[in-house]
Image (tube, rainbow, N blue to C red):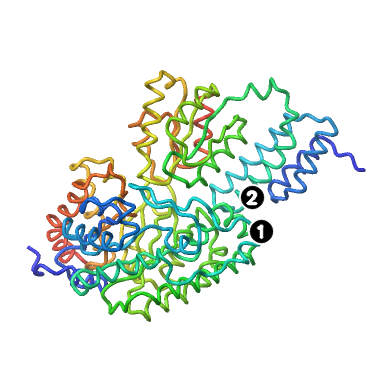
């Protein structure tokens, strides 16, 4: 059996993500665990790799199918690695509640942002699609979240984003809890109007804003 | 003053298509499901009862003096008939809530339903009712989902996009079945007799989604068959794509599409400026676009009037600079939200602004065009 060095094995893990080779990613992640290597460093390497892939997507060097398949590969490796991350290190991550707003079932944009936020080291709790207004607010309270991110593809459901934001302010959770809105019909002007703190035209810009606001 | 006398809706559109003088550019706010509010119906009724849908759209045409009737029910018509589970909210657009294709094998097993299915019948019947009332007076545009859009409604966008890479053969098998079903469905429409257009929604031909090469291996393979059927049925061929970076060279030039409806996004994607698009593509097609639909839900009357006026001026300048007389339809980038919170008076403000300022702006185009 060939024993790879830390750098070599992390490179192998990254290459598996770039090539969207899930089998190789799982095998490599398993080796990292078995060889008691630095799990947190491996998770970080995965995240950095995914953000690099996202940059290539933003520059039209690759396209959405590649991004989605790399994202799946990253999650496959993370599922092996994360149970071995120390609880204290896991709890130190900032929590973001994410979901597609009530009335809308389109979730691809939400899933892309979730991948990027995970890659950037946030603990992302995904409520799925068609998430009721009240559910966003109750989950923020229950999870003690630092931010909430809502997505929609339909103008008709944008008012529900406004309702979540209003409830968060009424309950005194915002502005401590940061609010993000996104999706094709959403604009910066709308974000300002509803009191959202984060709006961006792509996932990478959004991640930078989350980092800046949540630290 | 503009010396072209007041035109009928029909004359205005058909003169604009061939770039001949018009009294003003055509007005085409995409009022679809929203129209049901004019007749006191719910969206569910609009989506399921042909008489309601037809009466709603006809009422909107009158109310807003629309030059074209946008005949769109929703984007789950064909997928619904294939067997995807569709949710019909009382006051929102129907949407697929359970996909039919959940594995690679499911692509291969996909079978065309009996055509026309119930949802297709609804759209066909609505078209017939509208044709009975206004054929030859007001043009109409029937929106039909393209093969790739149907497939994403059957399997989910993520699955399809991943399988484009992982299982291209299976995806292609399903696209072939869907295309055959679309062609059969188109065949069920009454003869168009040049009274309207069939507008294919080719949303996924978009560079923020996939490469030109991938797209050419998917929908492009089947597009000629669909186009042929539309023309054979006596309809004009039209395409709608409200994506951020539509593949204009492919969908306008390679598909030889005479009417192309699009959206513009000033802050993202490739379609940032209507002016650039008019200059680059008006020799090949008539652009239909692209006021921001947000205006109608969140804007005030003044904001809508100003945005419409500014947009008209921008289009006029681009037409003048590219040596065109009239080849453009002032429209919205997509369907105006059917939400109960969309303001009907804002739609009126758009068309009133076009009626008020259109003739003067047209005179300016006529005077300054470099032809």
Is A17 left, or right, of A38 in this rendering? Answer: left
The residue located at (26%, 52%) in the rendering is B41
Are the residues under badges 1 and 2 in a single subunit? no
Residue pointed to by mark 1 = B166
Q: Position of residue B205 (x, y in %)?
A: 48, 61
Quarter of the rendering containing residue B370: bottom left
Q: Which mark is residue B85?
A: none
Quarter of the rendering containing residue A27: top right
Q: Nearer the viewer, residue B41 or B75?
A: B41
Is B188 left, or right, of B51 in this rendering? Answer: right
Residue pointed to by mark 2 = A69
Q: Nearer the viewer, residue A5 or A76?
A: A76
Host chain of mark 1: B
Does residue B221 sit above or below B338 in this rendering? Answer: below
Q: Position of residue B230 (x, y in %)?
A: 38, 76
Separation of marks 1 and 2 at Cα, in angstroms: 9 Å
Residue contact at pointers 1 and 2, CB within 8 angstroms: yes
Q: Position of residue B10 (x, y in %)?
A: 19, 71
Could you say whether the residue bearing mark 2 is in a helix, strand or loop?
helix
The residue located at (50%, 44%) in the rendering is A109
The quarter in which the C terminus of chain A is drawn is top right
Quarter of the rendering containing residue A195: top left
Number of residues whose C-alpha sits closer than 10 Å to that of mark 1, classed few (under 14), some (14–19) or many (20 or more) = some
Could you say whether the residue bearing mark 1 is in a helix, strand or loop?
helix
Q: Position of residue B140 (x, y in %)?
A: 27, 67
Number of residues whose C-alpha sits closer than 10 Å to that of mark 2, classed few (under 14), some (14–19) or many (20 or more) = many
């Amino acid at each position: 059996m060939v024993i790879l060095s830390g750098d070599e094995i992390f490179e192998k893990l990254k290459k598996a993500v770039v090539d969207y080779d899930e089998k190789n990613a799982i095998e490599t992640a398993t080796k990292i665990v078995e060889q008691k290597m630095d799990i947190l460093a491996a998770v970080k390497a995965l995240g950095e790799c995914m953000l690099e892939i996202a940059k290539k997507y933003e520059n039209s060097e690759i396209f959405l199918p590649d991004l989605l398949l790399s994202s799946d590969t990253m999650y496959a490796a993370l599922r092996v690695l994360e149970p071995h991350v120390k609880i204290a290190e896991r709890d130190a991550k900032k929590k973001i509640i994410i979901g597609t707003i009530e009335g809308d079932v389109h979730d691809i944009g939400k899933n892309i942002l979730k991948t990027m936020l995970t890659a950037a080291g946030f603990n992302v709790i995904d409520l799925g699609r068609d998430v009721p207004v009240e559910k966003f607010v109750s989950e923020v309270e229950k999870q003690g979240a630092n931010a909430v991110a809502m997505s929609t593809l339909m103008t008709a459901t944008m008012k529900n984003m406004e309702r979540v934001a209003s409830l968060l302010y009424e309950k005194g959770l915002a502005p401590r809890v940061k609010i993000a809105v996104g999706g094709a019909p959403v604009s910066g002007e709308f974000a300002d109007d509803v009191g959202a703190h984060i709006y961006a035209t792509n996932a990478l810009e959004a991640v930078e804003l989350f980092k800046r606001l949540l630290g | 003053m503009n010396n072209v006398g007041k035109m009928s809706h029909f004359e205005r559109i058909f003169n604009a298509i061939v770039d001949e003088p018009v009294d003003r550019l055509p007005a085409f706010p995409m009022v679809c499901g929203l129209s049901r509010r004019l007749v006191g119906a719910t969206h569910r009724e609009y989506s399921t009862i042909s008489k309601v849908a037809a009466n709603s759209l006809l009422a909107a045409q009158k109310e807003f003096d629309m030059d074209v009737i946008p005949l769109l029910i929703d984007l789950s018509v064909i997928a619904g008939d294939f067997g995807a589970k569709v949710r019909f909210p009382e006051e929102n657009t129907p949407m697929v809530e359970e996909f039919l294709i959940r594995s690679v094998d499911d692509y291969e097993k996909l079978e065309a339903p009996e055509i026309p299915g119930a949802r297709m019948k609804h759209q066909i019947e609505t078209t017939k009712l509208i044709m009975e009332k206004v054929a030859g007076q007001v043009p109409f545009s029937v929106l039909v989902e393209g093969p790739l859009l149907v497939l994403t409604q059957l399997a989910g966008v993520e699955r399809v996009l991943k399988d484009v890479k992982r299982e291209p053969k299976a995806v292609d098998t399903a696209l072939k079945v869907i295309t055959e079903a679309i062609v059969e469905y188109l065949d069920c429409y009454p003869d168009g007799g040049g009274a309207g257009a069939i507008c294919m929604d080719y949303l996924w031909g978009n560079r923020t989604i996939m490469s030109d090469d991938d797209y050419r291996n998917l929908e492009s393979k089947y597009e000629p068959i669909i186009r042929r059927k539309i023309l054979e049925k006596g309809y004009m061929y039209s395409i709608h794509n409200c994506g951020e970076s539509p593949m204009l060279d492919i969908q306008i030039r390679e598909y030889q599409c005479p009417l192309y409806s699009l959206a513009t996004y000033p802050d993202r994607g490739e379609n940032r400026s209507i002016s650039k698009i008019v200059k680059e593509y008006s020799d090949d097609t008539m652009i239909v676009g692209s006021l921001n639909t947000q205006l109608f839900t969140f804007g005030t009357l003044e904001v809508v009037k100003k945005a419409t006026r500014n947009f008209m001026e921008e289009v006029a300048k681009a037409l003048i600079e590219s040596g065109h007389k009239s080849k453009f339809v002032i429209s919205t980038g997509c369907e105006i939200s059917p939400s109960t919170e969309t303001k009907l008076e804002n739609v009126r403000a758009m068309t009133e602004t076009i009626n008020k300022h259109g003739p003067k702006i047209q005179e300016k185009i006529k005077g300054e065009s470099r032809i």
